[in-house]
Image: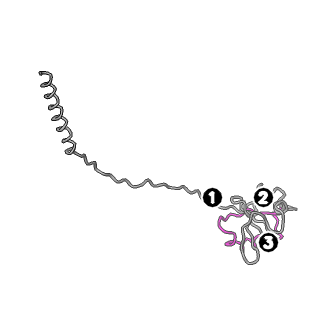
Amino acid sequence: MNRIKSSRIGFTLGTTLLAALTGCVDHVEERHHARVYAPAPAYVERTVVVQDDYVYYPSYQVYYSGTTRQYVYVEGNSWVTRPAPPRVSADVLFASPSVRLDFHDAPAMHHAAVVQTYPRNWAPPGSGHGNQGGHNEGHKRDGKE
């Protein structure tokens, strides 16, 4: 009988304890966290601006940009930029007299003055047959050494 009494007492205590613990679930305190809003990270793209450098070939009235590796010239009534020179091979163009120019914007902005300074028959002083070195070597700036 003691055993039955102990079992009932244990059962009653266990049930009471279980009821007390499940009742606490409704009263769980919720912690409120402060919300911090941070702005999204800013991504900055760095841009490197490389200025065009032009070599002018008076015999053909063609400009070559070593930066873009493009030829600029007048075709009809418009200025065009192309990967190849007009009416002549690049080898023939590079073997003709040339002058490195010191402006870095569009050749159209300077063409009138360039043509006047360097006419079609222009050659560097002291050269008998043009710039035989090609466009990447020894260009004279404005016709001077």
N-term mark: 2 or 3: 3
Give percent across and percent down for residue 136: 76, 55
- Which residue lies at the image location 53% right of the left edge and 56% below the top edge? 45
Q: Which residue is mark 2?
A: 135
Q: Amino acid at mark 2?
A: His
Q: Secondary structure at mark 2?
A: loop
Q: Residues within 10 Å of mark 1 (few under 14, many from 20)?
A: few
Q: Which residue is mark 3?
A: 119
> Residue 50: which numbered mark, if any?
1
Looking at the image, residue 90 sits to the left or right of residue 41; the answer is: right
Distance CA(mark 3)–CA(mark 1): 29 Å
Q: Residues within 10 Å of mark 3 (few under 14, many from 20)?
A: some
Is residue 27 covered in magenta? no
Looking at the image, residue 21 sits to the left or right of residue 36; the answer is: left
Q: Quadrant of residue 71?
A: bottom right
Q: Amino acid at mark 3?
A: Pro
Q: Which residues are magenta?
A: 97-126
Q: Secondary structure at mark 3?
A: loop
